[in-house]
């Protein structure tokens, strides 16, 4: 064979050769799907391979752990990536198959702390036990829940299950130790401290789920030593609606309205990711106009979401006036969405193949561009109200400092990651729609404190304004030629070929992704959602400890979580 006829080694080939040289023949034959490389590995070899990939290949970011019921066996998927820039191989998925009757996989939570909550969720919903996990409790369902809902043979006995749950929930926790969720010992056993001869005992209290500063139905179990928080244990699931299970029961088309209810402050992004992953499975090409309309509504929704953050964060630290200003300006964006699709919160506007309706005539000139002329000065005004306030500065500067290593290790994305100095944005790393044709900067922080997390979001709003101006410029040039071409040609029924893939977008809270498995029918076989609010909150037990109670509120506010997305 001549040199020109020899196959050129791909980055994946080189990675596998290095891994096999170091670890032996532990990886199965690779499979390439779009921008994802996949390899299978035995459960007994997982930790060795995973540690090599982290330490030697640079995969420092665990995006998700998802379980799939293959009927004959269960499969656990580990999706790895590198921050801030992807490796030449791109995303890498490790597959581990285990028998249904003895679904045991070694934990990797000591390699990637992000695995802690991901493994708990996989145990909770699919029944995969992670050997060596330090705290393998259910995370979304009550500890006394029976069965694992994401298994295909799961049968929900509503007649008896509801009665048993109500009986447990209505019984005081001190009367049933098992129903309390098997709390860590620090919350069930008094911890004594000696303060120069004065002996005190920590007290355990609840913050939430009915508390305005938790921004939703989040319950924080706190262990207090005076005014200091020594331990934090978030209790999730109060808003759990099992969207991943519901997705298996709906068609691809009927599943779009469900997405509006995840992160209800960024419903356009939720619509997009569901449609985007379905279009990728189908190999569907969209009209050019549809891409630009999608980017238009995505950036408007990003502004609306960040305005809620700025306004409510001001309330968290004692400033009421910015809240009124932010919601005044947000109403203008919601008016645009109402004109566009008839809704102000749950839009169902982005559809498979495009969008549900074209832009109204003069929508850009009368609504969007006039808003872009008005809004920058108002944003600067609100920003000055906060950053020029000495109380706000004292409550945020130097408070809640998060290191870049912790943020990457726990799988944080979005403004929280960038505030700690990591320049990562999915729109740059893995461009979708037509973001690769737009010019924008990725703002990052310097200290990683509460102030930086606020400033990064304000800077992102200025970038969104710039993006919207570029999008409006494209429409001024192409509007007449493309008007009416907002939806691609679709078959009568949406049945993607049997395959699977992962796609992600950049939402106001970070990387929102879906691992979608199709069996060729009208309904997804499996829909694993990477929820950025869930991942971002996983760091809170670490960063919330040894803080003052007042500072805990300021720190939690900067996470900007939406509990509909946390609980899934």
Image (cartoon, helix red, strand yellow):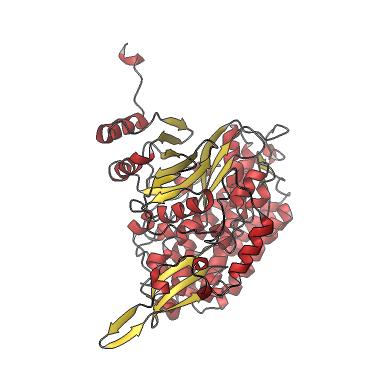
Residue 33 drawn above or below residue 290: above
Image check: 420 left or right of 372? Answer: left
**Position above or below: 174 against 300:** below
On screen, residue 334 versus residue 81, left or right, reads: right
Residue in front for this viewpoint, 103 or 250:
103
* Residue 291 vs residue 479, the one in the foreground: 291
Q: Is residue 428 left or right of residue 163?
A: left
Visible in this render: residue 207?
no
Kindly indicate the quadrant of the structure image that contains residue 543. Answer: bottom left
Task: In the displayed orientation, state which residue is furthest to the top.
Answer: 1
Q: Residue at x 31, y 86 (%)?
A: 199
Q: Which residue corresponds to the image point at 64% horizontal and 54% vertical from the top-left? A: 260
Marker count (numbered): 0
Indicate the position of residue 568 as horizontal and vertical percent values. 57, 55
Q: From the viewer's perspective, is residue 266 above or below residue 31?
A: below
Residue at position x 55%, y 50% from top? Answer: 148
Going by the image, does 311 lie left or right of 493?
left
Does the rendering let one see residue 455?
A: yes
Nearer the observer, 315 or 514: 514
Residue 57 image offset from top left, x and y in percent: 31, 41
Q: Quadrant of the N terminus?
A: top left
Which residue of the protein is positioned furthest toward the bottom in this rendering? 198
Give coordinates of residue 62: x percent, y percent.
40, 48
Residue 114 in percent (x, y) is at: 40, 54
């Amino acid at each position: 064979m001549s040199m020109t006829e020899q196959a050129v080694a791909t980055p994946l080939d080189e990675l596998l050769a290095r891994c096999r040289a170091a670890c032996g023949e532990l990886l199965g034959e690779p499979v390439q799907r779009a921008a994802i490389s996949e390899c299978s590995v035995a459960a007994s070899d997982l930790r060795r391979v995973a540690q090599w990939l982290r330490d030697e290949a640079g995969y420092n970011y665990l995006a998700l752990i998802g379980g799939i019921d293959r009927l004959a066996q269960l499969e656990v998927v580990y999706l790895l990536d590198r921050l801030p820039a992807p490796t030449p191989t791109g995303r890498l998925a490790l597959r581990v198959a285990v028998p249904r009757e003895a679904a045991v996989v070694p934990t990797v939570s000591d390699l990637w702390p992000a695995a802690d909550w991901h493994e708990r969720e996989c145990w909770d919903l699919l029944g995969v036990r992670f050997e060596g996990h330090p705290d393998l409790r259910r995370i979304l369902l009550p500890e006394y829940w029976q069965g694992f809902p994401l298994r295909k043979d799961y049968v929900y006995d509503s007649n008896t299950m509801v009665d048993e749950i109500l009986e447990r929930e209505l019984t005081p926790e001190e009367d049933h130790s098992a129903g309390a969720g098997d709390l860590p010992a620090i919350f069930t056993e008094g911890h004594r401290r000696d303060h120069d001869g004065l002996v005190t005992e920590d007290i355990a209290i609840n913050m939430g789920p009915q508390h305005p500063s938790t921004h939703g139905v989040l319950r924080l179990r706190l262990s207090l030593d005076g005014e200091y928080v020594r331990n934090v244990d978030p209790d999730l699931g109060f808003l759990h609606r099992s969207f991943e299970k519901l997705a298996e029961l709906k068609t691809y088309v009927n599943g779009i309205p469900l997405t509006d209810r995840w992160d209800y402050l960024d419903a356009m992004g939720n619509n997009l990711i569901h449609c985007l992953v379905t279009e990728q499975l189908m190999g569907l090409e969209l009209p050019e106009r549809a891409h630009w309309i999608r980017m238009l509504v995505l950036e408007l929704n990003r502004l609306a979401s960040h305005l809620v953050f700025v306004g409510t964060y001001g309330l968290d630290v004692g400033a009421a006036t910015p809240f009124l200003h932010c919601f005044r300006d947000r109403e203008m964006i919601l008016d645009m969405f109402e004109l566009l699709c008839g809704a102000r919160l749950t839009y169902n506007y982005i559809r498979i193949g495009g969008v549900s309706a074209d832009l109204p005539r003069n929508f850009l000139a009368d609504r969007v561009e006039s808003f872009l002329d008005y809004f920058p000065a108002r944003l600067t005004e609100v920003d000055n109200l906060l950053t020029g306030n000495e109380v706000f500065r004292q409550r945020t500067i130097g408070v809640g400092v998060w290191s870049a290593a912790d943020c990457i290790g726990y799988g944080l994305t979005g403004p929280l990651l960038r505030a700690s100095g990591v320049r990562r944005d999915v729109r740059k790393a893995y461009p979708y729609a037509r973001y690769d044709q737009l010019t924008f900067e990725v703002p990052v922080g310097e200290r990683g404190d509460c102030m930086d997390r606020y400033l990064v979001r304000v800077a992102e709003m200025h970038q969104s304004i710039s993006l919207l101006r570029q999008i409006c410029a494209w429409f001024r040039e192409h509007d007449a030629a493309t008007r009416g071409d907002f939806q691609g040609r679709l078959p009568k029924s949406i049945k993607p070929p049997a395959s699977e893939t992962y796609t992600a977008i950049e939402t106001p809270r970070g990387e929102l992704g879906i691992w979608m498995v199709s069996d060729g029918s009208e309904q997804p076989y499996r829909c694993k959602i990477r929820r950025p609010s869930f991942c971002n909150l996983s760091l809170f037990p670490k960063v919330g400890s040894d803080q003052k109670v007042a500072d805990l509120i300021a720190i939690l506010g900067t996470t900007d979580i939406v509990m509909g997305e946390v609980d899934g």
